Image (cartoon, rainbow, N blue to C red):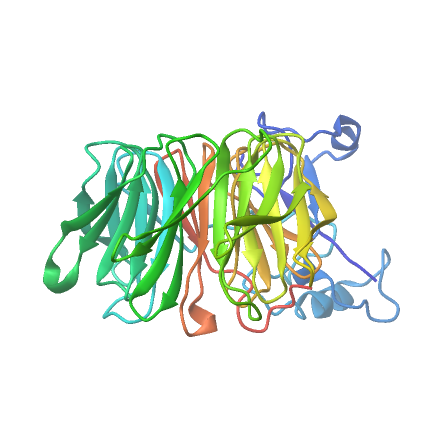
């Protein structure tokens, strides 16, 4: 039997789902609820009800039930079910990016300190030390143009960044250096983020949107040798998002791409050919992510829907289920490394967390005052230290410690 917790929106920062004006969409329900609360389904607060509990449960029964939530986001034991509770807060926040946050990337192993890299709309890349919670270094190499993607090679020694100046830059960060050692001209002024895949030690494939709106170019790094250019036969509009991946069985890498017309295509990089295509959205595909173990992906758009799909054994894309959102617009999607959680960055200033297995809504995280443009899970080796980071147009980064070791995510 499922139970739900209630949460009160506090100054627009609660867990309440609703419109951008801070009010829910069902005004009849709001009128019936004098505290203006909304029920947020949390898997963490859904254990089996003990016998004799329910609407007439005693405080002792309710307290015992609440204590079974073994999570950082647990029900408050001192409050009976049905009572509102304070909104959750970030574990901590990072300020000082100096511009809207477009991209985030964790590097929490292989170095002296766990790091978070962020790229801003003002062209700066901040390297945050997660131990001190301060900026360790700031680098600028895109002539003030917006940085839309960052990643690292060889742990943290080499940084790679993409800007809207049509350049992909490689940075040497070893021995306290921060200089551009190489660059790639993309020819694209769009917002499609690069995708990178390690093919062998110190060798990578880099995919990026090309000069023509529908084309995807793939090169080898560090040699910058061209591999292929992928262009669909039909007019699908601009390429919006891409994901390189290597199947466990198969001779070469594959690439998933979302297009302006709402289609998702699966490409064979080695054969330079399209394997399959599916219409995932009626609007442009703004973001996608893919689970290479389950061969399952999910995409978001400007609409109120997430679309889940799989790649079958014949490499056919098959649309599965959809998740309906309260408000439209998703900037980015990210699956945690253990395959248990999915996070979405919403245009409505919220971060939503789902159980990846069943796409069950777990939490709505509210802190930001503007569009959330990036989400990322940390790669800590210790599960207890894992973090979820969100970067917003409000120039702040929020970090959350949720659903870690022992959490039931469904």
Where's residue 119, x and y in %? Answer: 31, 43
Quadrant location of the C terminus? bottom right
Q: In this view, does 153 lie to the left or right of 58?
A: left
User: Residue, x 52% and y 67% (percent of image)?
Assistant: 251
Quarter of the figure with residue 142: top left
Left or right, 188 with respect to 241, comes to left
Q: Nearer the viewer, residue 366 or 300?
A: 300
Residue that lies at the very extreme toward the front in this rendered image: 271
| In this picture, residue 207 sits left or right of residue 98 | right
* Residue 238 in view in this figure: yes
Q: Can residue 344 be seen in this view?
A: no
Figure check: 219 above or below 75: above
The quarter of the image holding the N terminus is: bottom right
The x and y percentages for residue 386 are 45, 65
Q: Which residue is rendered at x = 41% and y = 30% of the image?
A: 212
Number of numbered discs visible in the structure rendering: 0
- 203 vs 237, left or right, is left
* Percent of width and height locating residue 57: 83, 62
- Of residues 191 and 63, the one drawn nearer to the viewer in this rendering: 191
- In the rendered image, residue 387, in percent from the top left (x then y), is placed at 44, 60
Query: What residue do we see at 59% from left, 67% from top?
Result: 293
């Amino acid at each position: 039997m499922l139970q739900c917790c209630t949460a009160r929106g506090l100054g627009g920062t609660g867990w309440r789902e609703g419109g951008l004006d801070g009010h829910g969409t069902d005004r009849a329900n709001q009128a019936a609820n004098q505290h203006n609360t909304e029920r947020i389904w949390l898997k963490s607060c859904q254990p089996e009800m003990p016998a004799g509990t329910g609407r007439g449960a005693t405080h002792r029964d309710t307290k015992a039930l609440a204590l079974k939530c073994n999570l950082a986001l647990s029900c408050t034991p001192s409050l009976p079910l049905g009572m509102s509770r304070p909104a959750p807060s970030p574990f901590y926040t990072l300020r000082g990016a100096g511009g809207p946050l477009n991209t985030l990337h964790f590097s929490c192993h292989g170095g002296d300190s766990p790091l978070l890299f962020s790229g801003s709309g003002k062209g700066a890349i901040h390297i945050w030390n997660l131990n001190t919670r301060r900026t360790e270094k700031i680098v600028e190499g895109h002539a003030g143009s917006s940085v839309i993607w960052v990643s690292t090679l060889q742990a943290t020694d080499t940084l790679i960044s993409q800007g809207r100046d049509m350049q992909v830059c490689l940075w040497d960060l070893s021995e306290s250096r921060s200089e551009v050692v190489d660059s790639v001209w993309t020819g694209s002024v769009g917002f499609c983020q690069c995708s990178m895949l390690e093919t062998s030690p110190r060798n990578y494939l880099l995919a990026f949107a090309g000069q023509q709106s529908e084309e995807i170019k793939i090169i080898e790094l560090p040699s910058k040798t061209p591999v292929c250019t992928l262009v669909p036969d039909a007019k699908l509009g601009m390429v919006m998002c891409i994901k390189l991946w290597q199947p466990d069985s198969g001779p070469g890498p594959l690439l998933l791409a979302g297009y302006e017309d709402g289609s998702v295509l699966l490409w064979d990089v080695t054969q330079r050919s399209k394997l399959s295509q599916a219409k995932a959205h009626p609007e442009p595909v703004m973001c996608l992510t893919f689970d290479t173990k389950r061969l399952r992906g999910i995409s978001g758009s400007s609409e109120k829907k997430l679309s889940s799909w799989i790649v079958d054994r014949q490499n056919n894309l098959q649309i599965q289920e959809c998740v309906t959102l309260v408000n439209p617009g998703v900037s980015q999607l990210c699956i945690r490394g253990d395959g248990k959680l999915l996070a979405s960055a919403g245009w409505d200033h919220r971060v939503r967390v789902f159980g990846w297995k069943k796409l069950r809504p777990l939490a709505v995280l509210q802190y930001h005052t503007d569009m959330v443009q990036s989400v990322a899970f940390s790669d800590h080796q210790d599960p207890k230290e894992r973090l979820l980071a969100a970067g917003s147009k409000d120039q702040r980064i929020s970090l959350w410690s949720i659903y870690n070791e022992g959490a039931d995510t469904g």
